[in-house]
Amino acid sequence: MIRSFPAAFAILLAAAPLAAQTVARCENHFAASVHSIAEPLEANTATYANGAIRIVLMDVGAPACCPEYLVVLHPAGSEPDEQYRKCTLVSLEPDLGFSRIDFAGRATSYDPARGLTISFGVEIPLGDAFAPGGLDVTINQAT
């Protein structure tokens, strides 16, 4: 589990084989550019918690093996200088996305102690092939 930013943000990746995952701020990362939002927009973005949380599928197009990332817009926290939402980029590695993220097939669950969990099926590059896996993104606004 990785914790990052004032809102607790956990990313869990369950895959065969086990792979790395990265959570980073969106600022100045090529994959977080509005040019990379997967089209059609209506099918590749979703909101939760009365609009406080938004997830967006990003497709940078290259490299062909791993072009898909997730952007999560979430509350910034409770500090006075954190009055706006934060943007968090979820990827396989710092500059490498997933081969595929099944955005339409996502599932959600909520546990008051943990927060909102959004689960995705993913494909991970494995040499010249791809391995199926799972990606859980947990956002806890309370912490």
Image (cartoon, rainbow, N blue to C red):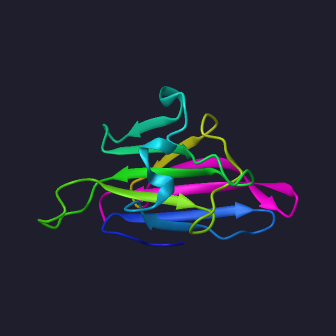
Magenta span has 39?
Answer: no
User: Which residue occupies 48% across, 57% down?
Assistant: 30
Q: Position of residue 37 (x, y in %)?
A: 49, 40
Compared with residue 63, is residue 7 higher up or lower down, i.e. above or below?
below
Out of 5 and 26, give the one closest to the viewer: 26
Q: Is residue 133 magenta?
A: yes
Secondary structure mostly taken by the magenta-highlighted segment of the chain: strand
Q: Position of residue 65 (x, y in %)?
A: 75, 54
Q: Nearer the viewer, residue 46 or 141?
A: 46
Nearest the eye: 59 or 55: 59
First to last magenta residue range: 114-143
- Can residue 5 be seen? yes
Instruction: Answer with the quarter of the image where residue 9 lies.
Output: bottom left
Residue 36 as seen in the image, left or right of residue 68:
left
Would residue 140 be seen by someone viewing this image from the given angle? no
The picture quadrant where one finds residue 6 is: bottom left
Quadrant where the N terminus lies?
bottom right
Q: Is residue 53 above or below residue 18?
A: above
| Residue appearing at x 44%, y 72% in the figure | 3
Q: Which quadrant holds the C terminus?
A: bottom left
